[in-house]
Image (cartoon, grey):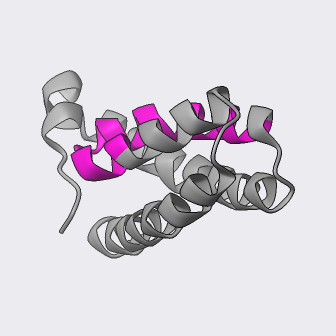
Amino acid sequence: MIYSLDKINEMAEGDDDFILSVVSVFLEEVPEDLNALETAIAKRNYDQIYKLAHKIKPNVDLLGMEQTRANALEIETLGKSESNMDAIAAKFPLLKKDVEQVVAELKKDFNV
């Protein structure tokens, strides 16, 4: 398991509906943002790369995915500075793998 519900549990204060809501939003939005990020990388659209990585970052952070958050931050920073598309392209597969793994785990763990 590469995610943790510690931050969400702390925020939820025992509210299971809140936890399910956060997980549902993650499952709905992050895969779409990840696909859009992959497209932006293919099109070499630095502005979109920056914006999408910036949007993904807090979602993975909320699930305690520190390494994934750091990777998203690196992609965001590279996108903002409009430099080194090769580095962005090299970092993206790990981000994608981690997000896809967590999506699968969350679906299984929450029966959604």
**Image quarter in which the N terminus is found:** bottom left
Is 35 colored magenta in this rendering? no
Magenta span dominant secondary structure: helix
Pick whichever, 12 or 46, lies toward us: 46
Q: What stretch is highlighted in magenta?
A: 48-70
Question: Residue 69 placed where, x, y %?
Answer: 35, 42
Could you tell me which residue is drawn at 24 percent across and 44 percent down? 66
Report which quarter residue 73 is drawn in.
top left
Report which quarter residue 10 is drawn in.
top left
Pick whichever, 47 or 60, lies toward us: 47
Q: In the orientation shown, which residue stands out farthest toward the right?
A: 43
Pick whichever, 76 or 29, lies toward us: 76
Report which quarter residue 61 is drawn in.
top left
Q: How many marks?
A: 0
Is 61 colored magenta in this rendering? yes
Question: Residue 27 placed where, x, y %?
Answer: 51, 56
**Image quarter in which the C terminus is found:** bottom left
